[in-house]
Image (cartoon, helix red, strand yellow):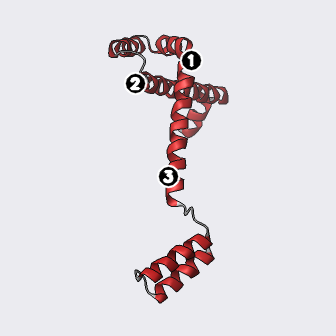
Amino acid sequence: MSVALVESFPLLEVFWTMLIFFAFVVWIWILFTVMVDIFRRHDTSGFAKVLWIIFIIVLPYLGVFVYLIAEHKGMTERAIETQKAQQAQLDTYIQSVTPDASPTEQIAKADAMRAAGTITDEEFQQLKQRALAG
């Protein structure tokens, strides 16, 4: 049975099938990118978004390619804005979790807390060792 299957499905057909499958996956990826961009837009009305979606559903390939041709510059700008916003959010998070004080400043703060009676000498020594360790 397997010999008959191999003989009826030559290498060229396997290559062609893989090529078609790859093209279909790329088209699905582009379709999702276009759909996300349509819903991400703030410069168009809901009615215009609905028209684009209907156009893409009725004529899928043509609709996606027309949208890419008509809105390629706007898609790029929106993608860049999204990346900048995500980078700013990441930078803010990183700055919030990293200590901004040098070891000297951390030891001075711990010493002030010890002098105020907030922490004990043992806790001060632990904070001092942690600050010096990095």
Q: CA distance from mark 1 to mark 3?
A: 32 Å
The reply to whether the C-beta atoms of the residues labelled 2 and 1 are less than 8 Å apart is no
Dot 3 or dot 2: first in sequence order is 2
Q: Which mark is residue 13?
A: none
Name the one closer to the observer, 31 or 112.
112
Q: Mark 2 packing: few (<14 Cα in 10 Å), some, or many (20+)? A: few
Q: Which secondary structure lies at badge 3?
A: helix
| Residue type marked 2 | Phe
Name the one closer to the observer, 65 or 122.
122
Q: Mark 1 packing: few (<14 Cα in 10 Å), some, or many (20+)? A: few
**Vertically, is 44 above or below 2?**
above
Q: Which residue is mark 2?
A: 39
Q: Position of residue 30 (x, y in %)?
A: 52, 25
Q: Which residue is mark 1?
A: 72
Quarter of the figure with the C terminus: bottom right
Q: Position of residue 72 (x, y in %)?
A: 56, 17
Name the one closer to the observer, 11 or 21.
21
Please tell me whether mark 1 or mark 3 is closer to you in this view: 3
Quarter of the image where one finds residue 41? top left
Q: Which residue is mark 3?
A: 93
Q: Which secondary structure lies at badge 2?
A: helix
Residue 121 appears in the picture as rendered: yes
Dot 2 or dot 1: first in sequence order is 2
Q: Which residue is depicted at the point 33% across and 12% down?
A: 47
Residue 24 appears in the picture as rendered: no
